[in-house]
Image (cartoon, grey):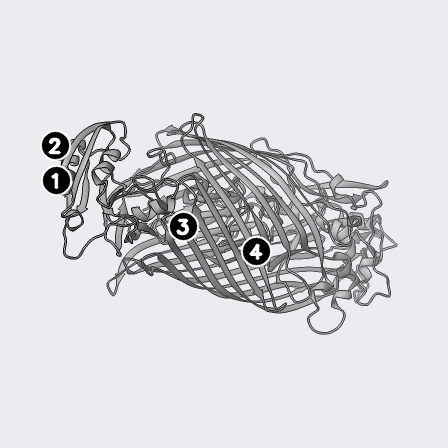
Amino acid sequence: MAFRSSIPWLLVAAVLGLLVRPAGSAMAQDTSDTAPPLAAADTDSLYSIALRGVSLPRALERFAAVTRASIAYDTDLVRGQRSFCTRRSAPPRELLRCILDGTGLDYVLTSNGTYVVVGSARQQPRYGQIAGVVVDESTGEPLPDANVILADASTGTSTNPSGLFHLSDLVEGPHEVMVSYVGYEMAVVRVDVEPGEKTKRRIELTPRPLLTEPVIVDGLQPRLPSSSLGREEAKAGDLEQPSAGTGTGDIARTAGTLMGVATQSPLADLHIQGGASGEHEMVLDGAPVRNPVSVGRLISAFSPLALGRLTTHKAGYGAMEGSFLSGVVELEHDLTRRDTRWVSMSADPVSTNARAQGTTTIYGRPVTAMGTARIGMWQVYQDPALHEMIRDWSSLDPLLARAWAYPALPSSDASFLSTAASGSSYSHQPTAQFSDWHAAARVEITPYRYLFVSGYHGRSTIGASLLTDVGSEPSAPNNPTSTSPTSDGTTQTAPAPSYDRYHWNNTVGQARLEWLIGDRTIGSVQAYGSHYDARSRYRVGELEVQDTVDGGPGSYGLTGLWRPDDRNRIAEFGAKTRLDIGLSAHRRIDVEAGVEYLRSQFRVSNAFIPTLRHDLEATRAILAANAEWALNTSTFLEAGTRLTYVTSRQTVYTEPRLAIRYDAPDTPIGGYSVRLAGGIYRQFTSQFDISRDGASAVVPTASVWLPTDHSLAPPRAYHLSADGLWTPAPGWRVNLETYAKFQPHLLAIDYPALRSGIAVYGTGTPDQSRFISSSNGRAVGAGLRVAYESEDVEASVSYHISRSERTFPNRFDERRVPTPWNEPHRVDAQAEVDVGAGFSLQTSWTGIWGRAWGFRKAYYDYLTGPRPARTTVGYNRVASFIERPSTPNFNRPSTDRLPAFLNIDAGLGYNRTFGNVELGALLQVSNVLNRRNIIDRSLLPATFGYDMRPRTLPGRLPTLSLTASY
């Protein structure tokens, strides 16, 4: 009896079963000696046959001879059966159905085109599975996200981060499995599936450079493109590309080139599709890394020689990725680099990098390990352009300087202007230093069980010491502390020393075990720890004239030195286990359970706010699940949810999420894929950026990471996203993304409450609701990217339009305003051309229009909102004395526009291999047009009103970087 097409699950059941009787033997007819077997898809050929009471085994032999098809059957199953069949001009499938009519038997067609005779569908079918690992043939390194499909494309999967895969509910008998991975030869492996058994295979792929995406096979790509929509990836080669103007790889800058991801200067803060810099999570090998710092072109957080992949999950990301409002950035260590046998080294004006890797055997188990170390070169060489940039960033701001050193004087005072506003009289002593190390190892306990451990530690420091040079100035009678008498009756302007330093430390470690558990399941267990410590110091001195014993000229003494140190430390420890279960050939489910412990401590104080201390411990339990159904060969449905129990609020929070994907790889206009997704997204550990008040603040904000306490509900957002991919011709790719994020409940620093001092009144740790308030917002946007790739050329151009706005507690009349990081219009273009003989030309161009918040962020945070009354508990005198300009009044940041940001970079690269040594060089020119792109502005008091002084990025900057690998 034939299966009905209207009952697809019944067809699946038949494909999964081949009845085998213990006493019988299997027979197969293969006509390969005379002609190749009939292809499974060959239904155009027609055949005729006439059988009258012929034994079924003989009838099946006749079928194989006539059609040249391969056929397999159990001899016990067909013994004693006879066939009566007459057919003219019929296709093979109809012919075989006629032969089996009346016998109570049926057939299924396997992926390699073999007809398998099985019992009736009413009988219980038997199942088989294929599981295994995909590795690099030369190094043995597991290959994550490799494409594993059956030859007839009836089902498929991809490998997990450890290269493991499984295919469930396959019909017993021979199958052809195709495995592909970018940069490797495709492998086609014949696997015989036994009923009720799991067949294991170790599949090795041979490296081969590929310049394009995998080709289409039988009308279907090995891995359907829709599975990659909603996220962006950068591989090891992209991560090593030097950041423009520095010659060193910068992870943040690389991420900023991905569609929907933007970076802000001077800090390279990441913003995913209109979200704040603290509304996404960065994880390294599954462990959280808080606030990895990239400062301008001076400091980067991770050695690019250590990392193999960066993945950014954007709006509508799945339930298994995490709980954050905007997205997740995943980083993975690279254990074995194909272009490195033992050692790699690179040097540039900013840093020196080294990497070592190797493979050995310990107690009979293969072990692969790598280590990298990197150190900044600032102590050896200070590039003049970078030195100038720090000088520009650390220029004294008159309004903020008055809050520290001149609280009793108007900022229009002449002596104040001479000491605080004259940038030409400053003596700068900048510093910028960083270092980091990475280590990772993989132990192959068994062929299908791996232990992966890794660690990272990074340190960064940036700052500037600033001293006003002494010069002759007229006496300023209204400022006795700013002048000193001299022998000739003139006075000397008092120096205003400033010390500004920022230190960051990050440490992360993790261990993960992954293995094939059973016929249908891949499991993993992971434990991790993460520690983040940030400290900022700003010191300023009040100077007074000291009389001399002999009555000579007075001298200056440093008194009343105020040393407020801001600090934030957060320690996190967690454990989680995950199961990847194949329910059937078209259904799978992922389940994860875990627990997290966090402790956060911070201290903040400055001239505007009293000292605020906070200490909090938090514990959370997490359960997440995500199911995927293949509705047909083109349509996939994903549904999942996250459940998070927060002990401080004794509440379980749910985050349901849904996505549907569709692929049409072979149409008259080319292939295209679509993904629609949405859901609820919460965030249980938030980053708050508190503006620095320092008059020469190099870093504009101090970041504080806090888990929410009992007084505040976690922030919440709703995502809707639509992503598309169109491949109109070989080498061409067109990506489109749109998103809408509705944010009914956000959390933001309440600056008026901080200035009033009410947050620190009382004893112990204050509730977060005293200095953090609820806000709301929304973010909408769309992006389009066109890319072309051939053997010699790689080029792309993209355009992104966005609008991100939200309310800020007790400021801007409680209306919704554009966010400081919003980039309404952005255009990016990149191109690389291989000109031969190892040389390549590179260029990139970026343009941004419509930026707002044109002044220093501290102006909007400290010079807006209601003034605190003098009777307020914890009242700060500076908050009352500080002058607030009437024009501009900083109450409408959307009208404080910045000019367009335009930047062009160009470079010439060279790579050549000499035996086992590969050498590379890259000469880059950043900002070819020598354009002074403005970051923000300060106000300088003038005779009438104020003049504006911009802070800019460096002009034209050539750099040279060198690499060597063995």
Q: Determine the CA span between mark 4 and mark 1.
A: 61 Å
Label annotation for residue 587: 3
First of labels 4, 2 by sequence position: 2
Q: Nearer the viewer, mark 3 or mark 1?
A: 1
Find residue 675 and report its horizontal and vertical position in percent: 50, 40
Residue wearing tag 1 = 58
Three-letter code, disc 4: Glu
Residue wearing tag 2 = 34
Q: Residue at x 84, y 65 (%)?
A: 872
Q: Determine the CA span between mark 3 and mark 1.
A: 39 Å
> Is residue 179 visible in the rendered structure shown here?
yes
Label annotation for residue 655: 4
- Mark 4 crowdedness (10 Å alpha carbons): few <14, some 14-19, many ≥20: many
Q: Nearer the viewer, residue 655 or 19?
A: 19
In the image, taking residue 286 as reference, residue 740 lies left or right, namely: right
Q: Determine the CA span between mark 2 and mark 3.
A: 40 Å
> Is residue 146 visible in the rendered structure shown here?
no
Find residue 855 and report its horizontal and vertical position in percent: 73, 44
In the image, taking residue 831 as reference, residue 538 lies left or right, namely: right
Find residue 366 and report its horizontal and vertical position in percent: 27, 59
Q: Nearer the viewer, residue 570 or 424?
A: 570
